[in-house]
Image: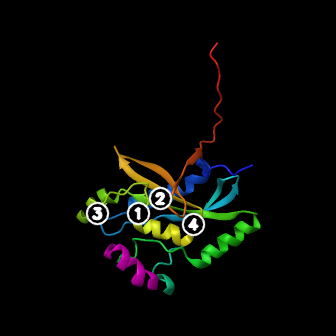
């Protein structure tokens, strides 16, 4: 039996800690600090369905890991622009945290499926120069670079924006080659079809 087309499955309960963290980071954004929110997705892959069972956070080693500093100086900033000189602009998952998450996942017979990160409506919150480059749930060129480099099968972008005084989010998932994968979120309620009498 052939594998089905890939899909990402997760629940409101699993997603909630990430949305809460993203909302906190969003509220702390200033025109000088985009404030990233990044985590890894842990779960199983069954017949093409990437079933996310946990979302795990780690530290940003962007300014503390020598390999991260070197890659940003030698590759990221020259390729993607001076905006990435800002140490708050991008994320480098602490390799020790990633190792601990990977070992804990293996002990539960799970695996790291990929990543999730926030795109805020930086074109509204950031400096004047950011207004020409709207963000959404689509990957940026920097995201595409990271998705390809990591090779993880699932890379979720969570776009967060404030509309009419409330925060809203949109999710989109991407394969390492940046082909889009459908995302399905289970609301924790059973839907049933009942005919009216």
Residue 172 visible from this viewpoint: yes
Looking at the rendered structure, the secondary structure element under dot 2 is helix
Nearer the observer: mark 1 or 2; the answer is 1
Q: Is residue 61 above or below residue 147?
A: below
User: Which color scheme did the rendering employ for the protein?
Assistant: rainbow
The residue that mark 4 highlights is 57
Characterize the local packing of mark 3: few (<14), some (14-19) or many (20 or more) Cα atoms within 10 angstroms. Answer: some
Q: Are marks 2 and 4 in contact (CB under 8 Å)?
A: no
In this rendered view, identify the residue nearer to me: 177 or 118.
Answer: 177
Looking at the rendered structure, the secondary structure element under dot 4 is loop
Q: At 65% from the left edge and 75% from the top edge, which residue is drawn?
A: 99
| CA gap, disc 2 and disc 3 | 20 Å
User: Going by the picture, which residue comes out furthest to the top?
Assistant: 197
Q: Position of residue 94 (x, y in %)?
A: 55, 76
Residue range of the region highlighted in magenta in the rendering: 69-84
| CA gap, disc 3 and disc 4 | 27 Å
The residue that mark 2 highlights is 22
| CA gap, disc 1 and disc 3 | 13 Å
Q: Main secondary structure of the magenta part?
A: helix
Q: Which mark is residue 140?
A: 1
Q: Position of residue 48 (x, y in %)?
A: 66, 53
Characterize the local packing of mark 4: few (<14), some (14-19) or many (20 or more) Cα atoms within 10 angstroms. Answer: many
Q: Are marks 2 and 3 in contact (CB under 8 Å)?
A: no
Q: Earlier in the sequence, mark 1 or mark 3?
A: 3
Q: Is residue 74 magenta?
A: yes
């Amino acid at each position: 039996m052939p594998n089905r087309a890939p899909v990402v499955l997760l629940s409101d309960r699993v997603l909630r800690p990430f949305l809460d963290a993203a909302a906190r980071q969003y509220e702390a954004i200033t025109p000088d600090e985009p404030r990233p929110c990044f985590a890894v997705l842990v779960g199983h892959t069954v017949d093409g369905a990437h079933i996310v069972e946990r979302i795990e956070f780690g530290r940003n080693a962007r300014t503390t890991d020598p390999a991260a500093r070197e890659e940003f100086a030698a590759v990221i900033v020259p390729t993607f622009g001076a905006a990435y000189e800002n140490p708050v602009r991008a994320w480098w998952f602490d390799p020790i945290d990633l190792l601990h998450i990977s070992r804990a996942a293996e002990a539960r017979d799970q695996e790291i499926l990929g990543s999730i990160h926030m795109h805020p409506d930086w074109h509204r919150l950031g400096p004047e120069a950011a207004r020409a480059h709207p963000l959404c749930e689509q990957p940026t060129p920097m995201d595409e670079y990271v998705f390809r480099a990591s090779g993880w099968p699932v890379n979720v972008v969570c776009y967060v924006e404030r509309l009419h005084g409330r925060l809203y989010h949109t999710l989109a998932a991407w394969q390492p080659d940046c082909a889009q994968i459908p995302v399905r979120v289970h609301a924790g309620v059973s839907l049933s079809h009942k005919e009216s009498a």
